[in-house]
Amino acid sequence: MLTKVEGYVLRAIPYGENNKIITILTEELGKRTAMARGAKKPASRFSAVTQPFTHGHFLLQQGKGMGTLQQAEIIQSMRHIREDFLKTAYASVITELVDKLTEQDVASSGIYQLLHQAMQAIEEEQDPEAILLFVEWKMLPVAGIRPFLDGCANCGSKEGEFAFSFQQIGFLCHRCFHIDPYIIRLTPVQVRLIRTFMFTSLEEVNSIQLKKETKQFMRKIVSTIYEEQVGIHLKSRKFLTQIERNPLLFADEKKDVPED
């Protein structure tokens, strides 16, 4: 059966001498995997459209198991992401996280729209670090984690000083700090920012000017949740950390997106 879908390439794995296995996230059909025959050849009609991050139309021959890519057309190549090693690194964390947390052949319009918004925003030169944070917080419920952020996770109080508790996976008020010796104390601004990333739109997040230290603090919390509560350790996050620590080492590197 032939199926035409619109989607984003999450991952492309070399297979054999000339082929690739690509993973595509679609809105209607969820995550699909397909063999793209000959896609590793530079002159192949599938060479460009099977690059990670590519937004395109894909005609798949579907049967039992993996499909086969029959035709493909690029909607948007995400050139600005691909030509900037730092944008590539942030986008890679986003696509790997989405890939890890989505099931095969299970449609999810919400996840697709989140990925679409994030990729478009990075391509349009918006802050990729803030966009990654937005995706990480928004994907927590998909991972089965719903942080209690409305008030204190222990007593329900909505007033006073707050801290983040990994034990409670949410806020604790100052009256309840004693129940978790490893809390991270928060300023009122940090409390508002966490709620903003969790509950508001990408447009609102992009309207906020965030200091580097603030973004790093926010990422430390959400990354710890994924690693300790969800058990997800992303290869792309390690690469991103290396780039952030030594950006000059990567400045002259080839900017093509690495394939798995």
Image (cartoon, rainbow, N blue to C red):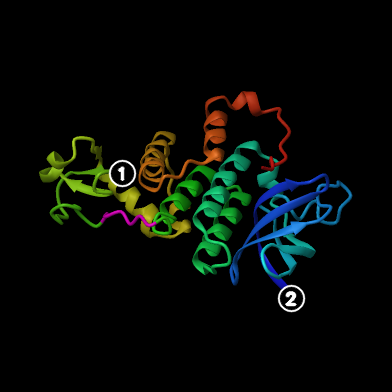
User: Label 1 neighbourhood size at 10 Å, few (<14), some (14-19), many (20+)?
Assistant: some
Measure the C-alpha gap from mark 2 to mark 1. Answer: 51 Å
Q: Position of residue 254 (x, y in %)?
A: 73, 33
Q: Position of residue 13 (x, y in %)?
A: 70, 47
Residue 5 painted magenta: no
User: Label 2 neighbourhood size at 10 Å, few (<14), some (14-19), many (20+)?
Assistant: few
Check contact, mark 2 vs mark 1: CB within 8 A. Answer: no
Looking at this view, is 224 or 188 the one in front?
224
Looking at this view, is 186 or 205 the one in front?
186
Residue underneath mark 2? 1
206 left or right, relative to 13: left
Q: Position of residue 56 (x, y in %)?
A: 71, 62
Residue underneath mark 1? 190
What type is the residue that disc 2 sits on? Met
Q: Could you tell which of marks 2 and 1 lies nearer the N-terminus?
A: 2
- Residue at screen point 45% across, 50% down: 136
User: In which quadrant of the rendered image does the C terminus lie?
Assistant: top right
44 left or right, relative to 109: right
Q: Position of residue 79 (x, y in %)?
A: 71, 48
- Residue at screen point 47% across, 52% down: 135
Say above or below: 21 vs 3: above
Residue 147 painted magenta: yes
Segment tinted magenta in the rendering: 144-149
